[in-house]
Image (spheres, rainbow, N blue to C red):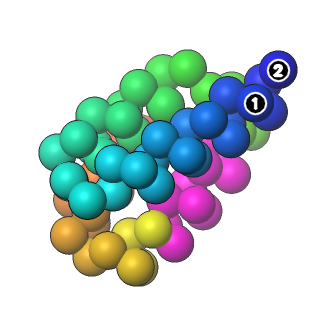
Amino acid sequence: MARAMLEYTKTVLKKVSFDANLFCREVQKALERLLPYEIEELKGFIHSLVQQNPELNQCLIYLKT
């Protein structure tokens, strides 16, 4: 079940990657609901999305916590 939440979160983040503000809000929600080891995996996924869409760079600040 936990794995399903991570995959769902990745899907949502891909879909909202067109809007940096919306993307940041979804990142914040993901960090609240995922388990620590899932967050580590999600960080790598987010970094790859940021490489494709540099305007999402501002959302990386939430991953520092």
- As helix, strand or loop, the secondary structure at mark 1 comes to helix
Closest to the observer, 45 or 40: 45
Location of residue 35 with respect to 51 vertically, above or below: above
Marker disc for residue 35 = none
Quadrant location of residue 8? top right
Where does the image place residue 57, in percent across and percent down from the top left? 27, 66
Closest to the observer, 17 or 59: 17
Residue 63 appears in the figure:
no
Which residue has dot 2 on it?
1
Where does the image place residue 20, in percent across and percent down from the top left? 20, 54
Label 1 packing within 10 angstroms: few (<14), some (14-19), many (20+): few
For the record, the magenta segment spans: 39-48
Closest to the observer, 33 or 20: 20
Residue in view at x 41 percent, y 79 percent? 51
- As helix, strand or loop, the secondary structure at mark 2 comes to loop
Disc 1 marks a residue whose amino acid type is Ala
Disc 2 marks a residue whose amino acid type is Met
Horizontal placement of 16 versus 48: left or right?
Answer: left
Q: Majority secondary structure of the magenta segment?
A: helix
Name the quadrant of the N terminus: top right
**Label 2, label 1: how far apart the Cα atoms are:** 5 Å
Name the quadrant of the C terminus: top left
Quadrant location of residue 58? bottom left
Horizontal placement of 26 versus 37: left or right?
Answer: left
Do labels 2 and 1 touch, CB within 8 Å?
yes
Which residue has dot 1 on it?
4
Residue in view at x 49 percent, y 31 percent? 30
Residue in view at x 26 percent, y 59 percent? 18
Residue in view at x 39 percent, y 39 percent? 27
